[in-house]
Amino acid sequence: MAERFEAAADHLGLDPGVRDVLRTPDRELTVAIPISMDDGSLRVFKGYRVQHNFLRGPCKGGIRFAPDVHLDEVRALAAWMTWKCSVVGIPFGGAKGGVVCNPRELSISELERITRRYTTSIMDILGPDRDVPAPDMNTNEQTMAWIMDTYSMHHRRTSTAVVTGKPLNLGGSRGRPEATGRGVMISCREALKTLGMRPEDTSVVVQGSGNVGGIGALLLHREGYKVLSLSDIYGSIYNEDGLDIPAVLAWIQKHRRLDGYEEAEHLPNEGQLEIECDVLVPAATENQITSENVDRIKARVIVEGANGPTTAAADKVLEDRGVVVVPDILANAGGVTVSYFEWVQDRMGYFWTEEIVNSRLEQTMVNSFEEVHTTAKKYDVSLRSAAYILAIDRVVSVYRMRGIFA
């Protein structure tokens, strides 16, 4: 991301001082989380919260629970959120948080105690007007409910707007679970329009089958695309005539994995991204398209459903080959957009129908794609470079208008 930031800053002619401001997180917090375990032992976990930028509004970003979480990763993801919020024009800065733990080795009660103690430890920097967390890797609606309750109990009032991604009956938004996948579908459709391609003539490979990949595949299927392949952590499935995506997702819902699904060929995950197709949607995890496999990628269009699925080195190869890449900070921004809608609804105390949420998400994503596409033509750059140029320019504009408080 640093390389992409510098390239965009060069196009904008930013001076070194402004670059330093935008590179440097506004606030970083590391906390110790002592927890009494179910067996009576005491363990200390480590937690982080990084607030990258407050210029456009409260910070926004997920909290992940994983054994390999580290501060540099959280810093990078917080900056990513700043640019993602900016590129779709929502009034948030970026943040990210994490707790170093393995949720698979912890009970529900242990996870609750970790969540509540972590929330209490970072509470001074949270708030609807300060920093609004959301689910991320290995966290979910229940995690957000615990955070909201902990914050509310300490402040002696129910504060639903302190987090997003909550259950509906605690102030969550309709359309939120499908939002990232829907944003991927809309981004794909808008990209194809610029190339004169039609959904009914387009084949798609989707890496992943969860909240982004699975829902994205379902929505693409409904739009008439032929989805050839899906995957999970255990392997991938393939059908050259196209998968029955509703049937595949029903199988996953029942069996928790693709293994055993009979209406497709089962393949290892290695090589799934190299299947011949028109559109490739990496919607699993980061660093999937690299210098080692980029020469074997056959797709004409790549729509990044995951954060950082393409390395900078691979990105240059794809650009030189003329592959259109709809970048992550645009393509998967549907989730944070509807998180913003949830925050707005919580603050109003008035909630929208799913049709209204989806309509406003559609408008935001279509307008954002058009602005990125126009920027790409203006500067004669890729969509990724254009997204960074647009996002950074918006933050810089606010910085210059506000000035430096001294």
Image (cartoon, helix red, strand yellow):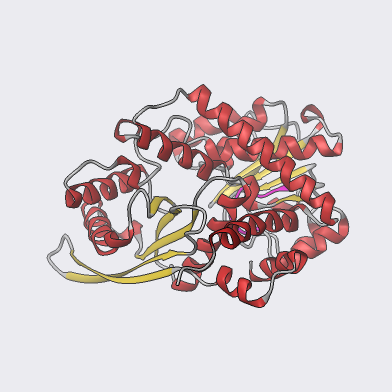
Q: Which residues are magenta?
A: 302-309
Residue 51 at what x, y percent from top left? 44, 63
Relative to 305, is 318 above or below?
below
Residue drawn at (28%, 46%) of the image: 148
Magenta portion: prevailing SS class: loop
Looking at the image, residue 1 sits to the left or right of residue 36; the answer is right
Question: Which picture quadrant has residue 353?
Answer: top left
Of 7 and 239, which appears nearest the observer? 7
Quadrant containing the C terminus in the rendered view: bottom left
What is the residue that sits farthest to the bottom in this orientation? 16
Where is residue 272 shown, x and y percent of the image?
A: 69, 51
Q: Is residue 178 visible?
A: yes
Residue 239 visible to an observer of this rendering: no
Q: Which residue shows up at 75% across the image and 43% down it?
A: 279
Q: 192 or 396, which is in the foreground?
A: 396
Estimate the x, y position of residue 132 in percent, counting from the top left. Answer: 39, 51
